[in-house]
Image (cartoon, rainbow, N blue to C red):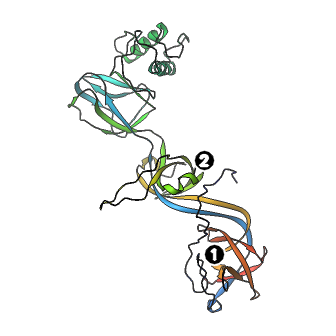
Amino acid sequence: MSARRKVAVSLTGVVVAAGALVTGWTVTAEPEAAAGATDVPTNTVAVEKGTVTQRFRISGTYGFDGSYTVIHRGAAGILTGVAEAGSTVRRGGVLYRVDGAPVRLLYGNVPAYRDLDPSVTDGDDVRQLERNLRTLGMDPDGEMTVDRDFTAATTAAVKRLQKKWKVTQNGRLTLGTIAFLAGEVRVTEAKIGVGASAGPDQPVLTGTTTRRVVTADLAAEKQNQIRAGDEVSVTVPGAGTVDGEVLEVGKVATSATDDNGNQEPATVRVVMRIGTPKGGATLDQASVQINLATARHQDVLVVPMAALLAAPGTGYRVRLASGAYADVKPGLYDDASGLVEVTGNISEGDRVEVPAT
């Protein structure tokens, strides 16, 4: 069993189990009268030691993480080509073409904002350009230092890149010939069609990362009770249940309004990573159900939830196979398994009554 902490979401100190309503065998937060319990046909089951996991369910979406908008930074012209929706553009690949000239993707967090050549001042955009040149194999002899300074070695590496791209080898990358984005891009939509005019600062296409994730909106009051690394299980339509973990929890809560203008409860965005579900390669924006574990107890005494009876006054008890009653205190409820943790006047191996099925 992983030692990693399960998602600990407080239920404000009240343990509530959602069980099927059977007269005299009801599991609720408010004890029911025990009258009539003996009228229910019963079987017996053994008290066992096991693991119970308390969890809650929320809806989410399985798709791709992040979003990019690629802005044209070069001179105005006619869009003569654009990467197809659903395609992936990687480092050095062509995002689109204006007047036949390609605009290529390089990786970096600083957007392209100036020409890059030996005349530029030191900057982080130079550093990320040099990282790309090194990764693309344009500095075979290791003469270039990856720093903020555009040196003669940088110029030589740019010329090698231009030779590879079959463009003029002048050691200068003019603004609008490359776009810096954080990583490879999965294209979702072309914002203008081929043949249309592409002006400066005009959006040309949108995309996402290629990282598949599950996202969900979580009630803001639970924001501080979930953290990266917590485990989840996700039910994907047609693919069953897939395990995963929380990658990040939003820091800022947001609140939308409904169709009537009423403010909806504030939520935070939770991003989760899961294993690849069956048929997952074709799924995008699929609705999924997420189980977030609120707590887990191992090696504890467990009985079926249906074994709990409301004791006279307050609390709970179980009826033993002998006909005697034993007072118990419920711990965690596991809706998935139908079990509940109990402590009290029972031991492993005792047999308790449950409604016959």
Asked if the residue at tag 1 contacts the one at tag 2, i.e. Cβ–Cβ closer than 8 Å, the answer is no
- How many C-alpha atoms fall within 10 Å of the one at disc 2: few (<14), some, or many (≥20)? some
Q: Tell which of 219 and 155 is nearer to you.
A: 219
Residue at 46 percent across and 18 percent down: it is: 123
The residue identified by callout 1 is 305
Picture coordinates of residue 40, whole percent (x, y): 62, 89
- How many C-alpha atoms fall within 10 Å of the one at disc 1: few (<14), some, or many (≥20)? many
Residue at 61 percent across and 69 percent down: it is: 15
The reply to whether residue 56 is visible in this rendering is yes
Task: Report the number of discs.
Answer: 2
Residue 168 appears left or right of 32: left
Residue 153 appears left or right of 313: left
Q: Residue 229 carries which label?
A: 2
Picture coordinates of residue 266, whole percent (x, y): 44, 55
Residue at 76 percent across and 87 percent down: it is: 324
Q: Distance between the residues labelled 2 and 1?
A: 30 Å
Note whether 339 is above or below 120 in the view shown: below
Which type of secondary structure does the marked residue at label 2 adopt?
loop
The reply to whether residue 275 is visible in this rendering is no
Q: Tell which of 160 and 22 is nearer to you.
A: 22
In the picture, which quadrant includes the N terminus? bottom right
Which type of secondary structure does the marked residue at label 1 adopt?
helix
Q: Which amino acid does label 2 sit on?
A: Gly
Residue 18 appears left or right of 112: right
Q: Earlier in the sequence, mark 2 or mark 1?
A: 2
